[in-house]
DNA sequence: AAAATTTGTAACTTTATAAGTAACGAAATG
DNA sequence: CATTTCGTTACTTATAAAGTTACAAATTTT
């Protein structure tokens, strides 16, 4: 299949939503992600159900942030997407009769489980707000150039 | 795509090869893996290039182990398969212009890299011979029942 | 030397799943 | 009531491994 890019994509969207002063339409978000509005709605649906974002219909509608990015760990986002399969690599059969096959599966599964735990731990360690912290200065400069005004410390 | 099951499959094959007293044909291996001989040849090709197994054609030919399983780490097997992509999850674009997208990719990539390192470390820690160590007794019993003879300690 | 066995390899089809797309009803606004 | 926007369903495309078919090349048996 295509590589599953939902996690980085919705993270990207959340960061934009935080900077937006009005709701962003699926159309606008689609342009940021180089895709179409329908896919945006489908992908964002999980985040809405999790209460991280809200969506309103009609004129002036779109997507808004409902929670501070400080309160959202990457793990929460991943879970809101339905915890999509992490690996493209798996075991051979579910419950093989052959003992050797079971041993092979067990060892493969062990390595994968260890990797999944590392992944999960890293996602739990980091909030979405953390993502822009190392780049805060860069982003501030970029914003200033774009808007022509100087942002106050703490604005983002 | 389908889940990549090459790693557990070739581990399974290596364990059988160790127990075999004659070369195993791709046909026989195919039956163990519930697949066909051609796929077996394709999948085993990397292990042959790595020198872990040998194959001979013609009558009485087939696949044999060329190295002790003690000398083969799971990581070596994985590498011999061409280090197939581990994740079904990836970043959005390679070098996005948008700073927020870059931040999202960076965070996702970091978690994936950490997971990959854990996976790799686990594969390096374990040899193929280790896979049957915890089950050695079970396998010995099974062999005895099948062959009707009692194996000596150390036979496997 | 001919027949049989077995690998090596190339070409093709199938499968699975996210991405991508189109369409339309429902809801909200102006 | 026209417009905007989401919600949802249905469909197509893309991708890579699995699965399959076929046949040449190498080896052994007869």
Image: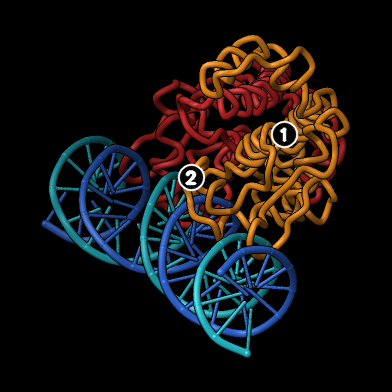
Chain colours: A red, B orange, C cyan, D blue
Coordinates of residue B108 in the picture (x, y in percent): 70, 35
- Looking at the image, is D23 positioned above or below residue A82? below
Question: Across the whole image, how many numbered discs are drawn on residues?
Answer: 2
Residue drawn at (74%, 22%) of the image: B156
Q: Nearer the viewer, residue B30 or A153?
A: B30
Q: In this view, does A147 lie to the left or right of A101?
A: right
Q: Nearer the viewer, residue C30 or B109?
A: B109
Give SS at disc 1.
helix
Residue A106 visible in the displayed image: yes
Coordinates of residue C2 in the picture (x, y in percent): 54, 86
Q: Nearer the viewer, residue B123 or A31?
A: B123
Q: Which of A95 and A80 is in front in this view?
A: A95
Asked if both marks, 2 and 1, belong to the same chain, the answer given is yes
- Asked where in the image residue A119 lies, by quadrant, the reply is top right
Residue drawn at (62%, 25%) of the image: A109
Circle 2 sits on which residue?
Answer: B31
- Looking at the image, is B99 positioned above or below residue A115? below
Q: Report the chain holding disc 2.
A: B
The crowd level at tag 2 (other Cα within 10 Å; few <14, some 14-19, many 20+) is: few
Residue drawn at (76%, 33%) of the image: B116
Picture disc at residue B8: none
Picture disc at residue B18: 1
- Looking at the image, is B112 positioned above or below residue D20? above
Q: Report the chain holding disc 1.
A: B
């Amino acid at each position: 299949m295509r590589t599953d890019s939902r996690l980085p994509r919705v993270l990207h969207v959340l960061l934009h939503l935080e900077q937006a002063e009005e709701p962003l339409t699926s159309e606008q978000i689609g342009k940021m992600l180089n895709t179409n509005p329908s896919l945006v709605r489908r992908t964002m649906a999980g985040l809405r159900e999790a209460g991280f974002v809200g969506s309103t219909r009609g004129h002036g509608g779109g997507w808004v942030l409902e929670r501070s990015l400080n309160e959202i760990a990457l793990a929460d986002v991943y879970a809101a997407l339905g915890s999509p399969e992490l690996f493209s690599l798996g075991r051979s059969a579910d419950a093989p009769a052959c003992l050797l096959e079971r041993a092979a599966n067990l060892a493969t599964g062990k390595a994968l489980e260890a990797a999944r735990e590392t992944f999960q731990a890293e996602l739990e360690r980091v909030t979405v707000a953390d993502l822009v912290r190392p780049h805060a200065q860069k982003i501030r400069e970029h914003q200033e150039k774009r808007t022509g005004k100087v942002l106050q410390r703490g604005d983002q």
